[in-house]
Amino acid sequence: MSALKTTVDVTSEDYAAYREAMLAKLDEIETEHAKAIEGGGEKYTERHRKRGKLLARERIELLIDEDSPFMELSPLAAWGSDYKVGASIVTGIGVVEGVECMIIASDPTVKGGSMNPWSVKKGFRAADIAAQNRLPTINLVESGGADLPTQKEIFIPGGRTFRDITRSSARQVPTVALVFGNSTAGGAYLPGMSDYVVMVKEKAKVFLGGPPLVKMATGEESDDESLGGAEMHARTSGLADYLAVDEEDAIRLGRSIIRRLNWHKRGPSPKARYTEPRYDAEDLLGIVPTDLKIPFDPREVIARVVDGSEFDEFKPLYGSSLVTGWAEVHGYPVGILANARGVLFSEESQKATQFIQLANQSNTPLLFLHNTTGYMVGKEYEQKGIIKHGAMMINAVSNSTVPHISMLIGASYGAGHYGMCGRAYDPRFLFAWPSAKSAVMGAQQLAGVLSIVARAAAESRGADYSEENDAAMRAMVEGQIEAESLPMFLSGMLYDDGIIDPRDSRTVLGMSLSAIHNAEFKGAQRYGVFRM
Amino acid sequence: MIARVLVANRGEIARRVFRTCAELGVGTVAVYSDADAELPHASAADAAVRLPGNTPSETYLRPALLVRAAQHTGADAIHPGYGFLSENEAFARAVIDAGLTWIGPPPAAIASMGSKVVSKRLMADAGVPVLAELDPDEVTEADLPVLVKASAGGGGRGMRVVRELAALSDAIASAEAEAGSAFGDSTVFCERYLATGRHIEVQVLADQHGTVWAIGERECSIQRRHQKVIEEAPSPLVDSRMREELFDAARKAAKAIDYVGAGTVEFIVAPTPLSEGPTPRATDAGEFFFLEMNTRLQVEHPVTECTTGVDLVALQLRVAEGEQLPADPPATRGHAIEARLYAEDAAKDWQPQSGTLHAFEVPRAANTFGASAAGGAQAESGVRLDSGFESGSVVGVHYDPMLAKVIAWAPTRAEAARSLAAALSAATIHGVMTNRDLLVNVLRHPAFLAGETDTAFFDRHGLDVLATPLADEAARKLGALAAALADAAAGRQDAKVLGGLPGGWRNVPSQPQRKRYAAGDESYDVAYRIGRSGLVAPDYEGVELISAAPDRVVLGVDGVRRTFNVARYGELRCVDSPLGSVSLTRQPRYTDPEAALPAGSLLAPMPGSVLRVAVESGQDVRAGQPLLWLEAMKMEHQIAAPADGVVAELNVKAGQQVDVGTVLAVVQAATAS
């Protein structure tokens, strides 16, 4: 085993500048996180509390094991949209009675917890994570159902929510619904599809149609309690398995359900003993240059993330723009692919392809550290078959069946984003550092390309090309693309699972790897045809 | 020569006698009741004999059983210890009649002193100053307050202080009843009560050849409920003239009854002139009066041993073997103080406590059951522990709640007090509430240090003040934080998954971790988070976390490093630090509604039996009205209505045994109208 050495000079001016820039970005993100935490704001929070109810995050805190870590997912969902940051729902992985669970809690302070298109997408992402990693799901339900004005974006795709619950159950991965309040109409299928249902006395309300609808449909006079009260469901309909006297009791019952699941993780256990990295995670703030055109050595990141800073590099002398090698994180073995100088050449692509195949042979999860501007372009490279070689790498990534985790630490542009297992390649988890940027290409390059194309078009029409307009167009496009390649925007679109503080990388990876190991996995034996 | 000694006693005194026997090469036999089967004394001897049953009258008070146990195990001598049958003439006779050696005074001497009424007359005749006995029928206002005392009594039982004439007949009746049940002799008598006298006693030792030693005096003025709490030798009050007079009186007392063996002559020293009353000698402060003679080894004998270097138990054995004492007793040197560690809640009327003593260690005590290592010379100063309990022992309800005696000796009184206070405060005592903090407060009290000790010490300086926990509110609050952080560390260590990740880590932190602890009636809600830059605990300004392990938490408190040792037993958390010891009960995170008790539930504060029930179910009661009485640890405990209301449930009847926490009754409070 070889321990990585560091050349980071924490006293240098560059380091200080990078660190300061990173801290400023973290401040911005914290401000956005605060919006998600704030939920519906002071007024609705106060009203909710006056009803003797706990906030979504308070429910989660009370549900999970004391002092256990909790990783919230997609906290910035709906950022940049017309909806509240966080999308009126909290999702995350937490430990309940020693079992890692996907916890999904509607935030009733935001429009009564009603689901908008982003809430639905966030829920889907959580369901995907639960399904891929075999995590039991606990739904903390209090939602007014669909946000009706946006029903067109919710109704048809939203049916997946209920499908996912029962498919989880069919895979013997339990689902639990703790119903704290409204769960009506379509929402009634949330408890309806779950393996275990707890309802809070006098608070839970679960019916297909409320009194007005029933009156209209059949003329029958009824009330909430007889149509869908917790007592009724516990004693008469049997939809509630447990009747909780209050919210705290519902959470207590939820924990006792998980305690009795007899849950066993199917993946291999981590090493019981491992050492922390030799270098301070604090340094991670000052490693990534503010200008992503300046390359940085990803080994400095690896050295602050992996156990004992020990990294066995594979093919160190070949294709040196991509670092590959083996390490462990919190006792879990991983293969790491990290861009070193941005560009992926044929050598790097072939090296990556081989490395991914090796990881599949040895059943080792893969970690992708993105800082790529994409595959190399140019006559020489096209003629040497860069498309074939890039395709090999993408083929290997696509068909690899060991779990992948992607972490965008710098640039993630073009097909390089694909080859490094971008969102579309289904990594189990994808996180971004505040320094990350992702787009089809850099904003400047994209604006330049548009400019060249427009100039050529004008020339072919024989029209005048206004340099002034060109400059304005380039500025506008550059601004737009730059904004759209920033992590907050991408996180809002649910293109990642969250923006993380670089110093938390090791912890986030530890949680992700541990979650992943709830399921068994087996390396791929087949790939698409590799073009040679 | 004695070959094997049976100790007809339990606890620390049994172990104390075994220690000397072992040093002398004498064999040992222990006896134990069922409740004591697991206590250290039961396994400290070469052999042990079970005394079936639990109550003293079933076990340690059965002469025939004890004699048979000695014969059965080949013991040729019986040491009675103190209490139980130690001053029982019939037992002494039975031992002697069985052909065994009685390590104690002649039965006749026991008999003479056994009756306080008789002994006072004997002493008066021998020229020993006594407080005159009062005829209850002739007690007048001028005699008040008076003391009603059991003639056969000891240890404060069957004793009543009467301050109003009207209360006298009731006091006599109840003292008679208590004396009757405790000693089998209901005789009581009356004398003037010296509310603030000083209790001074002289250790005597007499051989069978007429030598009578007065070895030194002890002062035992710090008392609660007429039981000694702190004893010392020599007395800070006694000067050499008074010492001579006391020793002379003590020797006279012993000679008057042909005493043999170790005994103690107790005197009370009047603090102020008694201007009137029928006691002509009591005209000056500093006058002393004979109280009683204890014809046995005293609980507090170690302070004499620590100031003289003698082993009183060894001398008892030698005297019993017929050896002759040298003409003069050894000289005394330095000062020794003994503190009795009781399992009790001093602040709550000395309520006895029971339960598992999870940990009991006095790290500074290098000596046990003796002032010197076996055969070695006595050091100039030291700390000695005489204990009947060890870590893991269960403190039961059947016997005296004394856990141990801690004795410190040093060249001066101030040094001994400082050393003893330090030893006690550094002791690890987990699981059972004790009077430790009270003892330390007394030992550090300016009045105590000035030698101003009298029997009203607790009243004078305020029990509430003296019983103040060593850990003040700030220390208790820090203790709760330490417990929470230690619990968090323990939880991380035991976690099945993600145990190696930072505790309580959040990528989107929104609120702290919370843990609740109760200490007595106080509740501590600890909210904390371990952030990137350390501890975030808004209620603990100026506190930083240096390290947290399941058993030890180091905090920086306003820049000062403080180490807290944390032990956990079930829900109990014991936090020890130089700031004082704190006992906390972890409160459950969730309440199980089925386990919740109805409001107004009255729980048994300790295991015991229901003496009598004064109300019926459905009866209206007023706040404070007694509902029923429990007897536990030889004490009566009244259970009173917490509020005006109605007895909704009554779950027990007289004679029933109840466990601690049993719901005895439920009083439904009347709704305010």
Image: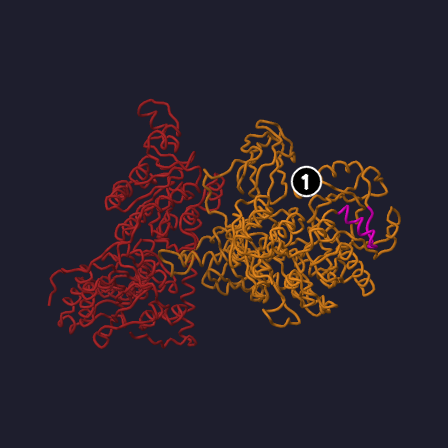
Tell me the residue at 55%/39% (across/down): B603
Tell me the residue at 40%/29% (across/down): A225
The boundaries of the magenta stretch are B116-132
Q: On the image, numbered disc 1 is attached to which residue?
A: B180
| Location of residue A277 by image quarter | bottom left
Q: Colour of chain A?
A: red
Tell me the residue at 10%/68% (across/down): A532
Q: Is residue A81 magenta?
A: no
| Location of residue A206 by image quarter | top left
Q: Looking at the picture, how far across and down is residue B188, in whole percent? A: 74, 42
Q: Nearer the viewer, residue B476 or A79?
A: B476
Q: Colour of chain B?
A: orange
Q: Is residue A80 visible?
A: no
Q: Nearer the viewer, residue B543 or A144?
A: B543
Q: Amino acid at mark 1?
A: Gly
Chain assignment, label 1: B
Q: Looking at the picture, how far across and down is residue B598, in whole percent? A: 52, 35
Q: Looking at the picture, how far across and down is residue A313, in whole percent? A: 26, 73
Q: Is residue B117 magenta?
A: yes
Check the image and report above or below for B667 versus A358. above
Check the image and report above or below for A192 versus B576. above
- Left or right: B521 as drawn, with respect to A165: right
Q: Secondary structure at mark 1?
A: helix
Of the 4 image quadrants, the one containing the N terminus of chain B is: bottom right
